[in-house]
Image: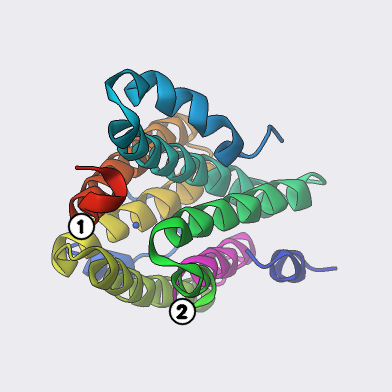
């Protein structure tokens, strides 16, 4: 079975750099524990339980989003590296990434409902699609297929618009800075894979840390907006 088929079978992560994305291919530009959702409550309680149930609910949301989005960055980087190399444990890594995707969608659904969760996960050019676009890029990079790399990057650019629009509509945050953040995330993951393919492992390590920190920051931003948007739910 081909690498692309493996990825698809498992059905697999929030602007100014969009031009750079469109121009880049595979060049080295600078730029299974328990499911995370099951481990959040203890952390959230230590962060907020002492100040009352309402604060604990807000803290729980924040820790949940921070943990799941940070985990997403790490799992995505690991899975693309294993896919690029054709490692035998790739399917397990891809399954862990998709399990994380479902957890993130469930966190969204806990606030906005099941339909929003389903759209987040499987809507056109949204969460699972952007992982599929990274699959396409990984396969093209391994084959040194510049045309296919560009097509995958073009699709990722489309994702930054579609996903930031989804988040803006749901949270009320302005779309432009959301799209900048989503684009930064895409560039970090792409850059880490490019660096890995080039053997620049120091850069891989740096971008991995940056991608994790950026997604935790994204979780903070989304949690703050959601709590402000739903004061009765979170007691703010």
Which residue appears at 47% of the width and 53% of the height? Answer: 107
Magenta stretch, main secondary structure, is helix
- Please say whether residue 220 is visible from this viewpoint: yes
Residue 206 location (% of width, % of height): 38, 31
Q: Is residue 84 above or below residue 63?
A: below
Q: Is residue 40 above or below residue 171?
A: above
Q: Which residue is mark 2?
A: 151
- Please say whether residue 31 is visible from this viewpoint: no
Residue 211 location (% of width, % of height): 38, 41
Q: Secondary structure at mark 1?
A: helix
- Badge 1: few (under 14), some or many (20 or more) residues near its Cα, within 10 Å? some
Nearer the camera: disc 1 or disc 2: 1
Q: Secondary structure at mark 2?
A: helix
Q: Which residue is mark 1?
A: 229
Which residue appears at 28% of the width and 40% of the height? Answer: 217
Camera-side residue of 208 and 226? 226
Task: Report the quarter where the C terminus lies.
Answer: top left
Which residue appears at 53% of the width and 43% of the height? Answer: 196
Question: Which span of residues is magenta-colored?
Answer: 125-145
Camera-side residue of 87 and 24? 87
Total count of labels: 2
């Amino acid at each position: 079975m081909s690498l692309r088929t493996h990825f698809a079978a498992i059905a697999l992560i929030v602007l100014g750099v969009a031009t750079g994305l469109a121009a880049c291919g595979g060049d080295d530009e600078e730029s299974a524990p328990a499911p995370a959702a099951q481990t959040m409550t203890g952390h959230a309680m230590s962060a907020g339980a002492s100040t009352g149930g309402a604060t604990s609910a807000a803290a729980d949301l924040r820790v949940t989003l921070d943990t799941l989005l940070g985990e997403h960055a790490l799992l995505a980087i690991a899975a693309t590296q294993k896919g690029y190399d054709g490692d035998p444990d790739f399917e397990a890594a891809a399954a862990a990434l998709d399990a994380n995707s479902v957890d993130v969608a469930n966190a969204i659904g806990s606030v906005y409902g099941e339909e929003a969760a389903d759209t987040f996960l499987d809507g056109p050019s949204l969460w699972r699609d952007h992982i599929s676009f990274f699959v396409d890029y990984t396969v093209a990079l391994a084959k040194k297929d510049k045309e296919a790399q560009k097509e995958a990057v073009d699709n990722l650019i489309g994702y930054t618009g579609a996903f930031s629009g989804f988040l803006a509509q749901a949270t009320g945050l302005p779309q432009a800075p959301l799209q900048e953040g989503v684009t930064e995330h895409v560039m970090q993951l792409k850059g880490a894979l490019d660096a890995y393919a080039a053997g620049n492992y120091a850069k891989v390590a740096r971008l991995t840390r940056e991608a994790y920190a950026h997604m935790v920051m994204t979780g903070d931003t989304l949690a703050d907006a959601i709590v402000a948007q739903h004061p009765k739910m979170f007691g703010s």
